[in-house]
Image: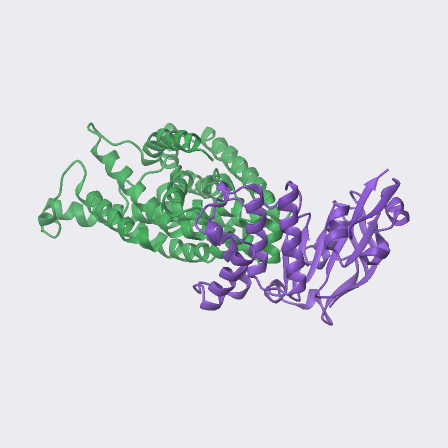
């Protein structure tokens, strides 16, 4: 793993610098601290946006890697366990109630918290990863349908379009306040998720083998639900739902650093940050008024990329 | 010593084990035989602490298994589940290194003692030359040896194996039997669920025959592997032959 850290961190640094410079206005390093319009764009818009992009990418990549390891399935990502959609439901309720800023963040986090509690409670009796993913799918479907219901009941077209735009996920016009709100939750959630690494390694041999090696399945399920809830909940609360990062980044990293789950966690976090920064820079460079929503861009980039990856994996002899 | 007393285990509403009482000793290979659904795997899982006991208890060297922490138990009892295909393509060395998990504190790197145990286990199972191969590229026999090495690397007093011969050709079956024999000769207690009666006759010091969740027979291998006991277990007449010092068991 360590062998790959330097190149990965270098690419991350370049992607971060690129995200600061790229946009409708190109801002070179000379202008960053200047007392000009460009300096203001840098401090008030580009910098918080780049930090937030790196952070949400990192937690999405990390939680994707953890969930794939836990469910022993390369198709898992944070959206399938219901945390994203529950947090999104909280955000939608906030928009309908006219809440903004901190209040909206609170609503989304409350949605994430409820989903974590339900996830653990529903998955509890049946125990293992299978119960976890089934409970997650129930939650995702339920909150998705409630969200659709709320959209259909929105009082005016303006609210509807605001909700839909928010749901698509974007880093546009985020401030340092958003960064400061989300960061503690993301950091705490990430630490909890990183602590699961060894348990995930043990799960490689199945649930019985993992338990016989001293892994407590209840504690592991709690940690994963809580870590995902904090980290992904906070990311959805400030940017809406951004898909695909958690799905494709761990795949890609496994090809580079090997498949041992604990070895993929930190590289997936870095890779997620890189992908999100690059995608968010790309949406700003598309000519024309306005910009493509990040969630849409990610899916548009992610799906063909994933397809290529699959084709390559399938053509490699097993 | 593992002492099992008045053990009962329920799987859902079905009673899988009832009234099982026996003592198992280190330095011996104990084979668990019986027809499908007799409770063999449930017994192995109960000894490994993986199922809730409905009655009775499992004692390890005088203390109840349930009273041990998960980690303490994991340091003393190694468990090789049935058909445990690794979900990810770890390297062989990474797979064997998993055996050291119970000995390591969180985030601690592999200690020299860990590395020694891993090397020793890989040498004993003759997979040292495969160390950097990923497990998805191994043959069935190599994979079986790598999985056995993982349990050996844990340096537990006990090794429990659930049908370790499944899907192996005869030479590779013999490899696994030899590894179990060697582990017992090195002082470990080996408890193995088997379907191959000949293999049991070959490797086991003691044989336990289960039927409908109850003990049908338990004792030194030659006293249990008799036509009468086997017929009672499997509802099928069996012949037991002695061929140049080896036992062959044939259904009639």
Residue located 15% across and 48% down the image: A40
Q: Residue furthest front?
A: B244
Q: Is residue A166 visible?
A: yes
Residue toward you, A110 or A199: A199
Q: Residue A230 in the image: x percent, y percent?
A: 44, 52
Q: Colour of chain B?
A: purple
Q: Is residue A229 visible?
A: no
User: From the viewer's perspective, is A66 left or right of A16?
Assistant: right
Q: Residue A297 in the image: x percent, y percent?
A: 32, 32
Say which quadrant the N terminus of chain B sits in.
bottom right
Tally of numbered discs:
0
Residue toward you, A177 or A169: A169
Q: Residue A110 in the image: x percent, y percent?
A: 47, 49
Q: Residue B239 in the image: x percent, y percent?
A: 86, 43
Colouring rule applied to residues: by chain
Where is residue A155, by image quadrant?
A: top left
Q: Is residue A180 above or below residue A76?
A: below
Residue located 69% across and 47% down the image: B163
Say which quadrant the C terminus of chain B sits in.
top right
Residue located 39% across and 53% down the image: A186
Residue toward you, B115 or A72: B115
Q: Colour of chain A?
A: green
Where is residue B67, by image quadrant?
A: bottom right
Q: Residue furthest bottom?
A: B62
User: From the viewer's perspective, is A69 left or right of A29?
Assistant: right
């Amino acid at each position: 793993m360590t062998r790959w850290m330097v190149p990965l961190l270098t690419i991350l640094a370049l992607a971060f610098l690129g995200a600061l410079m790229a946009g409708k206005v190109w801002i070179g390093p000379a202008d960053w601290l200047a007392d000009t319009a460009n300096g203001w764009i840098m401090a008030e818009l580009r910098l918080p946006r780049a930090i937030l992009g790196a952070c949400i990418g990192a937690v999405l990549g990390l939680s994707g890697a953890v969930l794939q390891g836990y469910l022993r399935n390369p198709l898992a990502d944070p959206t399938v366990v219901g945390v994203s959609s529950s947090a999104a439901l909280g955000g939608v309720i906030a928009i309908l109630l006219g809440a903004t800023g901190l209040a909206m963040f609170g609503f989304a986090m409350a949605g994430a918290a409820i989903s974590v509690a339900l996830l653990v409670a529903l998955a509890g009796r049946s125990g293992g990863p299978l119960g976890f993913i089934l409970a997650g799918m129930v939650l995702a479907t339920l909150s998705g349908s409630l969200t659709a219901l709320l959209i259909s009941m929105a009082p005016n077209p303006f609210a509807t379009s605001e909700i839909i735009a928010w749901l698509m996920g974007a880093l546009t016009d985020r401030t340092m306040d958003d960064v400061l709100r989300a960061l503690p939750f993301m950091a705490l959630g990430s630490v909890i998720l990183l602590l699961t690494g060894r348990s995930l390694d043990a799960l490689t041999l199945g649930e019985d083998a993992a338990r016989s090696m001293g892994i407590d399945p209840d504690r592991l399920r709690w940690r994963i639900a809580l870590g995902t809830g904090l980290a992904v909940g906070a990311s959805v609360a400030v940017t809406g739902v951004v898909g695909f990062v958690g799905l494709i980044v761990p795949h890609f990293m496994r090809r580079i650093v090997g498949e041992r789950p604990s070895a993929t966690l930190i590289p997936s976090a870095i890779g997620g940050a890189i992908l999100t920064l690059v995608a968010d820079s790309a949406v700003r460079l598309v000519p024309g008024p306005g910009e493509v929503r990040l969630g849409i861009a990610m899916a548009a980039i992610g799906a063909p990329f994933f397809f290529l990856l699959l084709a390559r994996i399938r053509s490699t002899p097993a | 010593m593992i002492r099992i007393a008045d053990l009962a285990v329920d799987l859902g509403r079905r009673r899988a084990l009832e009234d099982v009482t026996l003592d198992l000793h280190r330095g011996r290979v104990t084979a668990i035989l019986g027809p499908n659904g007799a409770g063999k795997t449930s017994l192995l899982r109960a000894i490994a602490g993986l199922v809730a006991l409905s009655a009775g208890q499992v004692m390890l060297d005088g203390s109840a298994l349930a009273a041990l922490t998960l980690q303490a138990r994991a340091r003393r009892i190694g468990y090789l589940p049935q058909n445990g295909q690794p979900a990810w393509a770890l390297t062989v060395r990474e797979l064997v290194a998993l055996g050291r998990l119970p000995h390591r504190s969180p985030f601690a790197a592999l200690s020299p003692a860990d590395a020694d145990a891993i090397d020793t286990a890989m040498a004993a199972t003759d997979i040292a030359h495969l160390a950097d191969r990923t497990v998805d590229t191994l043959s069935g026999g190599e994979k079986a040896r790598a999985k056995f090495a993982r349990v050996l690397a844990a340096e537990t007093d006990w090794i429990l194996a659930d049908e370790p011969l499944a899907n192996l050709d005869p030479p590779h079956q013999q490899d696994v039997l030899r590894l179990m024999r060697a582990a017992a000769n090195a002082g470990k207690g080996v408890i193995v669920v088997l379907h191959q009666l000949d293999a049991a006759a070959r490797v086991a010091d003691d044989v336990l025959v289960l039927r409908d969740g109850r003990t049908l027979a338990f004792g030194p291998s030659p006293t249990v592997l008799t036509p009468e006991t086997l017929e009672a277990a499997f509802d099928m007449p069996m012949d037991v032959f002695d061929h140049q010092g080896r036992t062959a068991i044939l259904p009639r």
